[in-house]
Image (cartoon, helix red, strand yellow):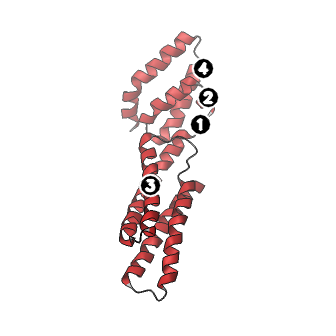
Amino acid sequence: MNVRRAARRRAASRAAGLRGDIKLLRGGRSAEPEVLRGRIARSAGAIEETLALGLDFGFSPDPELGRWRGHARNIARAIRGEIEGGRLAEASRLAAELIDTIGWIQRHAPEADAAAAGGPWAATWSGRVLGLAARSLPPHLRRDFVEDQCGNLCAAASRRERARYLLGVLARMPRLAAEGR
């Protein structure tokens, strides 16, 4: 299992545990409320630390994934602030929002990981252009498509022929994407 993915899962689990602890404390069903308060305070820091690892993708994510990653970090900070301010109901609500946000990231990060997994073609400008164009394809087809097209480009006899081939592929991308879905 991917270490970052496991860290995101732990952060969501800790957020769920935080919600449970807050519910116990607010309901007055805890025999040791001070112990519970300490655990709640530590949970906020643990969530932030775990997310720091889980959200460090090692590549620049697409704008949508980047936005959700920033949102998760902001929620984690807000949870800590709400707990420090004694607003446990709001901290619990934010923890639920964080769980949903991490769920979205979990569903979309593997796709981004697959898109970012480079091959030798990622070192060339034409390979990077094809990689961007391939984002219109389903994730499981992207790498093979780029590698095939780079192989075809290598067979071109001149720069002009490579440029013509690349432009032709880019012009056909909408049709290729429709066929790939």
Mark 1 vs 2, N-terminal side: 1
In the rendered image, the vertical position of residue 101 relative to residue 115, given as above or below: below
Image coords of residue 5 (percent x, y): 54, 56
> Please, what secondary structure does the residue beneath circle 2 have?
helix
Label 3 and label 2: CA atoms lie apart by: 34 Å
Residue of label 3: 74
- Kindly indicate whether the residue at mark 4 contacts the one at mark 2 (C-beta within 8 angstroms): no
Label 3 and label 1: CA atoms lie apart by: 30 Å
Residue of label 1: 118
Rate crowding at label 2 as few (under 14), some (14 to 19) or many (20 or more) other CA atoms within 10 Å: few
Image coords of residue 60 (percent x, y): 52, 40
> Which numbered disc, 3 or 2, marks the residue closer to the eye?
3
Residue of label 4: 154
Mark 1 vs 4, N-terminal side: 1
- Kindly indicate whether the residue at mark 2 contacts the one at mark 3 (C-beta within 8 angstroms): no
Amino acid type, residue under disc 4 in the picture: Cys
> Which numbered disc, 1 or 4, marks the residue closer to the eye?
1
Answer whether residue 2 is visible to the viewer in this image: no
Rate crowding at label 3 as few (under 14), some (14 to 19) or many (20 or more) other CA atoms within 10 Å: few
Residue of label 2: 123
Amino acid type, residue under disc 1 in the picture: Gly
Q: Residue at x 54, y 23 (%)?
A: 126
| Most foreground residue, 34 or 12 | 34
Label 1 and label 4: CA atoms lie apart by: 18 Å
Amino acid type, residue under disc 3 in the picture: Asn
